[in-house]
Amino acid sequence: MDKCITLGTAGHIDHGKTALVKALTGIDTDRLKEEKERGITIELGFASLALESGLRLGIVDMPGHERFIDHMVAGASGVDLVLLVVAADEGVMPQTVEHLEICRLLGVKSGLVVLTKTDLVDQEMLALAQEDVAELIRGTFLDGKPIVPFSSVTGEGKDELLNVLTRLAREVSAKRQEGFARMPIDRVFTMKGFGTVVTGTLLAGRLRVGDAVEILPSGHRAKIRGIQVHNAPVKESLAGSRTAVNLQGVEKSAIERGEVLVEPDRIQPSGRIYAHLQYLPQNKKALPNRFRLVVHWGTTRVFGRVLLIDSVALEPGKPAFAQFRLESPLLPVFGDRFVVRDFSTNRTLGGGVILDPHADRYKARLRDTVLPWLLRLQGERPEDRIAYFLWKQGKRGACTSELADWSQISAEQCRKLCQELAAKGELVEYDPDQKAYVRREDFESLCQEIMGQIGDFHRENPYQEGMPKESLRGRMSEPVPEKLAVFCLSWLDAKGRVALLKDRIRLSAHQVELSSQDAGLRKEILKRLTETGTMPPTLRELTEQTGCAEPRLKTVLEFLVKSEEVVKVAEDLYFARDVVEDLKTRFIRTLEEKGEIQAGDFKTLSQSTRKYSIPLLEYFDRIRLTLRKGDCRVLREKKS
């Protein structure tokens, strides 16, 4: 399938951008009444150009007036090639310079210069204009690119221009089709018989007719009814395409330009970003910390403040790492480009690349922790992005699908890199089914915390065999995925550091032993329970008799229950094990002889009062020795 290429026009007002597009395509991109009356482009215009090579260009015609620079920045987002237009009779003008800087800041890699209105100048003036342009583009991404003279009136230069566009288009790399679809919206309108239509340049992924989509940050959901690329209906739109999407289930009034059409549940709005910022050398003053400015991203702009991380103030021409705290949310991903402008002077200050689209709140004390990560992210190595995201996730870890979306790499590449990092010992795979990983440092820290929590439980409950498994995650300092917790326990068990019981966990070295003080209490309890036989003191009475506080007494009693020296018959009623076993033997013999026994007869058999005999009967029912039938008890039939 042919790659999709977007060409953007840029340049000063009234230098002939719209006339140039019309001469190439036959389309007048000035569609508004005001644009035609005033003879200037206000809104973004769109056209399509078919080249003889078979490639087709989507064209975005951008306004040149400084008052509409916002629209120009919106149009430049997603452009593959820029066509910088300079009128030969005027030469380089302020917006020529600013538009070129904006394209550079937004990461445009290629393009050309067209000297328009050549029919108005002689050869000497044309040569001066060419020198002027050559000086402008020296050292930029357009350095060494063609400078094509052109006249929209005579058609001079059209063939050469088309040949240059064909060559440059062939050199453009196809955008990545994997990953989730996202399209910043630059136009919203309704069409009779169709309903709501949005347009934009599809930055990644693909859109298909019938797909469910989400409009963010407003959160509206819709279904794709139809798609057009180059004014022709298609079933599917690929990354890089100028795309019109007919939406079902949402009204035009609910959508604004600047929002983003995305696959549902793949991305969340963000109010904070980390970025590498380039401050333009044309600026006259240093950029102060916490300066309020306008951030242009995609097809929208928001106000925000810049927090400089590695400098107190940013001098003209210098770069810096910074956090932007935004007053309205954006939908960026790693590697997205942006432009910043001064809203009071309407000047472009600089721009840069987003390193963390969902940054935690920056504080000065975090500088030495955050800065090394930002330096690594600037290197654009995908394995550093994976490591950084997992560092942010901490003891939660993440699966490769999340890592791929955040790192802006393919799922296959992400899986491969994670496997390589795991082989080096940098990552630990804790869920093979979901391909979920955690950093080695966080895994080891988590294992240490688990052992610490188990140790704390042992100290708090010295006579319990171990901690209930279900209570472990609730004791952790931060939420831990269940599969990660299970993996850690299995790893610790394999290493001999913990022992996994049926429903409990204990440290391998933990042994349940009574203290010397409690050993004396144990003897006293057993003596009293044995001497009183089937009418032992209640918990409250035992507390009074021993002079021991109830919590401590209950702890020792529970220990004796676990060691099978005492039987807990009711919540506050404990019997010596030998007493219960003797009664059980006599009870079975009586039932075997008589077949059944009533509660009153059992009271006589147990030589106790109703206060004790009824709980004892219920205990024998509970351990499935007997079965109640009316007022009688019978032996429960044993299953063969």
Image (tube, helix red, strand yellow):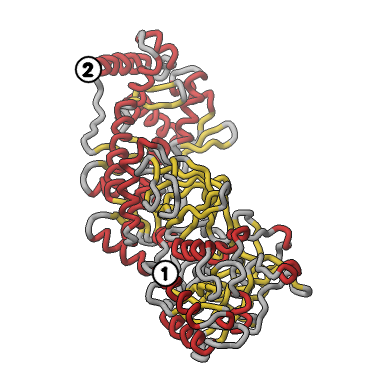
Residue drawn at point x = 44 percent, y = 41 percent: 288
Residue 309 versus residue 259: which sits nearer the camera? 309
Q: Is residue 509 above or below residue 50?
A: above
- Quarter-of-image position of residue 133: bottom left
Residue drawn at point x = 58 percent, y = 57 percent: 300
Q: Is residue 283 above or below residue 126?
A: above
Q: Is residue 119 above or below residue 283?
A: below
Residue drawn at point x = 21 percent, y = 47 percent: 495
Is the residue under label 2 in contact with that under label 1 (CB below 8 Å)? Answer: no
Residue 295 versus residue 196: which sits nearer the camera? 295
Q: Position of residue 262 (x, y in %)?
A: 56, 63
Residue 32 versus residue 137: which sits nearer the camera? 137
Can the viewer see residue 261 in this picture? Answer: no
The residue singled out by tag 2 in the image is 516
The secondary element bearing badge 1 is classed as: helix
Q: Nearer the viewer, mark 1 or mark 2?
A: 1
Name the kind of residue labelled 2 in the image.
Ser
Determine crowd level at label 2: few under 14, some 14-19, many 20+ residues with C-alpha closer than 10 A.
Answer: few
Q: Which mark is residue 137?
A: 1
Quick one: label 1 or label 2, which is nearer the N terminus?
Answer: 1
